[in-house]
Image (cartoon, rainbow, N blue to C red):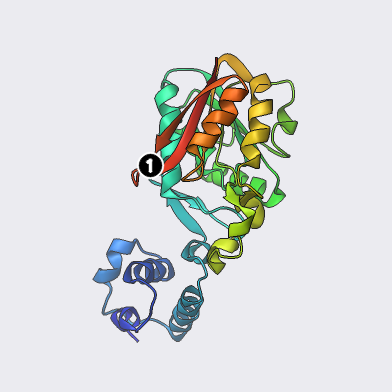
Amino acid sequence: MKVQELLKRPSKVSLRDRELLLAHLLKVKVGEVYLLLDRHVSKEMEEEYMRSLSLLEEGYPLQYLLGEWDFYGRTFRVEEGVLIPRPETELLVEKVLEKVPPNKEAVGFEIGVGTGCISITLLLERPKLIMYADDLQEKAVHLAETNARLHKVEDRLFLKVGDMFEPVKGMVFDFVISNPPYIPQKEWAGLPKGVKLEGKVSLIGGEKGYEFYERFAKEVGKFLKEDGFFALEIGHDQGKILEDIFSQEGFFAQVYKDYAGQDRVILGWKR
């Protein structure tokens, strides 16, 4: 069977995802697939493609099938049970980069490192930066270690398994960053099956969805330098309530919307 015949097989999977899947199996860049339309594929590759296509039609995430995904123009390894990097999170990175000059020596801390895409991107964009990061899941920490080695920043990223600020007691940082779980518990049942594979601990923020931020607001002050700041991804409708929560704890906080006009990032400073 030829590549073009595989690509034309009827499927409810988008053409773009089928192109990405084929590029992965052929071990070429996605733009090169159309240069290989007349190539004959082995029976084994045909069977692997059809098996993978069936999984995608059932809602299995393409990112987990590929084992990698792009964030901020770079490729990161991904694994089932760890949050998949999303383009919306790039705004969180951009806001931190705006506040950390390229020539500044700085130390940051990330809560919930996941794949490591946030910390690693910051390290690659700011060569004088050092990052500490933790995660509740040992699996995520190991994955972040793999990605740090892949991008050659393992000497500037210090990873620990732990909860919130527990692994960095007694330390202070120029900034603290996190993309925490912020979906309310009641929405779990309605999430797509593929999204649920990213893990409840990565997605669900408690009954209200913003329990992490309430705890964070009470604790973060002890871990920030006097001119330090925090940057957090937030739910699309959580901006106002989080501004109030941080104000009550003595912070000035500002919400930034994403390109779709939804609340996406909150930055805060000590008053």
Residue lying farthest top?
A: 226
Indicate the secondary structure of the residue bearing disc 1. Answer: loop
In front of the other: 234 or 119: 234
In front of the other: 21 or 14: 14
Q: Is 80 placed left or right of 42 in the picture?
A: right
In this rendering, is residue 23 above or below 127?
A: below
* Residue name at image x 46 percent, y 46 percent: 236
Q: In x, y percent, where is residue 93?
A: 45, 35
Q: Looking at the picture, which amino acid does disc 1 mark? A: Asp
In this rendering, is residue 159 above or below 96?
A: below
In front of the other: 49 or 37: 49
Q: Quadrant of residue 8?
A: bottom left
Q: In x, y percent, where is residue 18?
A: 37, 72
| Quadrant in which the N terminus is drawn | bottom left
Q: Can residue 152 be spotted in the picture?
A: no
| Quadrant in which the C terminus is drawn | top right
Residue picked out by circle 1: 258
In this rendering, is residue 23 above or below 227?
A: below
Q: Quadrant of residue 19?
A: bottom left
* Residue name at image x 66 percent, y 52 percent: 201
Disc 1 crowd rating (10 Å Cα; few below 14, some 14-19, many 20+) is: some
Q: In x, y percent, where is residue 229?
A: 53, 22
Q: How many marks?
A: 1
Q: Can residue 27 be spotted in the picture?
A: yes
In this rendering, is residue 29 above or below 256?
A: below
Q: In x, y percent, where is residue 50?
A: 45, 82
Q: Is 52 placed left or right of 184 in the picture?
A: left
